[in-house]
Amino acid sequence: MREFLLVFLVAAATTYLLTVIARDFAIRTGAVAAVRDRDVHAEPIPYLGGLAMLGGLVAAYVVAQHLPFLSQSDPFVFRDAGSVLIAGALICAVGVLDDIFDISALTKLGGQVLAAGLLVLFEVKFYFFPSATGSQFALTNEEGALLTVLLVVTTVNAVNMVDGLDGLASGVVGIGAAAFFLFCYQLSDLNGVTLATTGALLSAALAGACAGFLPHNFHPARLFMGDSGSMLIGLVMSASALTLTGQFDGSEISFGGEGGSPGWAVLLPLLLPVSLLIVPMTDLLLAVVRRTRAGRSPFAPDKEHLHHRLLEIGHSQRRAVFIMWLWAALISFGAVLVSLYSGVVIAGVMVLATVLVVGLTFLLPRMPTPQLKGAPLAADD
């Protein structure tokens, strides 16, 4: 655990320091977010935060190779992690081009598919689906490649679409990465196998990169991650889950702690990546339905995302981001707890957490703002 913590800290510190360089480079190249009708920022903000995040991921990868425990892990751990970083560098480069030159949505989609195809070429892909009986359903190369590209491209665009408020995407993905690290670590521990997995390594580094970027990106933001960052962290998040399916056979692992292995739970290693990003993916699905019903392109921007709705019902920008973080934490850590453990205590914790988050979402904006004694009333009181 200490070495994974060090990986997290290296990624965080490197990303934090590199954001200064990325911001200067963005200003020099004109990669600056102009103020548009659908935006919530009031002044131009530089892009290219993804370059700093990529630097943090690479630094964590290099350091991990020299740590006593992780350096002794199976060769495929760093091989697969390196493959993910190569594909991440490619999709980050596509994002940089978009941040600077504003390339077309179709060109950007082609870059996403190319990066996902690179993962398949490096054999970072789906290999099997576990059935509810605990047996393994092997996928053909074509089926595995198709599902891999679909998951990666969907996740990349989900993260890209949720990146609408300062600190929102980096916080949601950072929370998801932390939850996925917990899942990988506890899954290995419960089953008595090596704790050094590619999924744990990548998710620890990704959580660190998001944490290091957040101080520069939280409202009021001094730097945006841009498409270079949102597509990068979306790819790394989905690829982390893909590496897990290549290491664990669904028939070899058990869930639910000592209480046994509930049949449906063996499906969760594959469903978990979706649950970790259910907030941005829900936003993506609603956006596609909303835009196509209106006769517009699913890629056409608008101001009706979930975070925009939170602003409309009375949340401030910071509070709206905090609420979205809470939903992400509830779903991602809830999925981890339910998949690994069972019992009345877990069920009670989930119910209480859900009630709390729902209450903060819908009741907090309606609470009256406290007035200081003797202070004048607002004009609309």
Image (cartoon, rainbow, N blue to C red):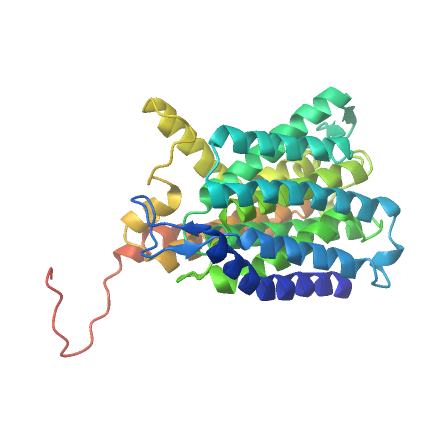
Q: Residue at x 75, y 28 (%)?
A: 128
Residue 334 in the figure: left or right of residue 318? right
Q: How many marks?
A: 0
Q: Quadrant of the N terminus?
A: bottom right
Specify whether residue 211 is in view.
yes
Q: Residue furthest front?
A: 28
Image coordinates for residue 38, horizontal then vertical, percent: 32, 44
Q: Residue furthest bottom?
A: 374
Specify whether residue 355 is in view.
no
Using the image as rendered, state which of residue 173 and residue 47 is in the foreground: 47
Image coordinates for residue 357, horizontal then vertical, percent: 43, 53
Q: Residue at x 62, y 51 (%)?
A: 177
Q: Quadrant of the C terminus?
A: bottom left
Using the image as rendered, state which of residue 51 and residue 170 is in the foreground: 51
Q: Is 89 located above or below residue 292 in the figure? A: below
Using the image as rendered, state which of residue 365 and residue 60 is in the foreground: 60
Residue 149 in the figure: left or right of residue 68? left
Residue 51 in the figure: left or right of residue 287? right
Image coordinates for residue 66, horizontal then vertical, percent: 84, 62
- Report which quarter residue 11 is drawn in: bottom right
Q: Residue at x 43, y 60 (%)?
A: 221
Q: Residue at x 38, y 41 (%)?
A: 305
Using the image as rendered, state which of residue 346 and residue 218 is in the foreground: 218
